Amino acid sequence: MKMMNFRRLDPAFQAAGKVGLSQGNRLEEEVWLTFANDREGLARAAAAIRTAINDDAVSVRDDAYEAEEGGLILRLHLSRERNRALVQRKRDQARGRHGLLVCEACEFDFSTVYGELGFGFIEVHHRKPVASLQPGDRTKLEDLALVCANCHRMLHRRSALLSVEDLRMIVGQQRGRLNADAA
Ligand SMILES: [Zn+2]
Ligand SMILES: [Zn+2]
């Protein structure tokens, strides 16, 4: 059907006395205008889309999370965490409180390790799973946690979201163990 939508826009098809599907959306027209005379660009874009679909940094495909909630839900969760205005307010709040952006689970500070490059960098994690949201729920600043990239992945590692406090405890226990081994 999508191919028939494109044929609506294809002069060669119309010249043959045929018509495609008359209904369609603006995006099809945009795609057609962009790629009708650029097959190489089309191939590159298609390859990029395939790569993105297979990129586990985005969809965590073979994770238990995917199996239980589905990739779409995880993507929704991650896209909420990228809500710029909210993320900015959360960062400002943390900076006002102690001047630093440190991971709430392991206390990693990007600027300590990466210098100027890491200054002001931190990820934002949404404590509530998308599935638990009620219609009309609005994200409050306390629903968000500031975490480093490693801790963020660990929070999402299992089918059920790990709490930041539990992860903090795991990190503390591991550090205790490492220190005991070193002694
Ligand atoms: Zn961390
Ligand atoms: Zn998260």
Image: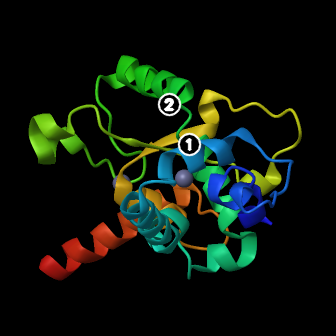
Q: Are marks 1 and 2 in contact (CB under 8 Å)?
A: yes
Judge whether 97 appears above or below 121 on screen: above
Q: Nearer the viewer, residue 176 or 127?
A: 127
Find the distance from the CA under tag 1 to the CA under tag 2.
Answer: 7 Å
Judge whether 94 appears above or below 183 on screen: above
Q: Which residue is mark 1?
A: 81
Name the amino acid type tagged 2.
Val
Q: Quadrant of the C terminus?
A: bottom left
**Res. 60 visible in picture:** yes
Q: Which residue is mark 2?
A: 87
Secondary structure found at label 1:
loop
Secondary structure found at label 2:
helix
Q: Nearer the viewer, residue 22 or 172?
A: 22
Q: Quadrant of the N terminus?
A: bottom right
- Local crowd size for mark 2, using a 10 Å CA cut-off: few (<14), some (14–19), many (≥20): many
Residue 40: which quarter of the image? bottom left
Rendered residue at 58%/50% (across/down): 32
Write down which quadrant ligand 1 falls in.
Answer: bottom left
- The spot of residue 34 in percent (x, y) is 49, 46
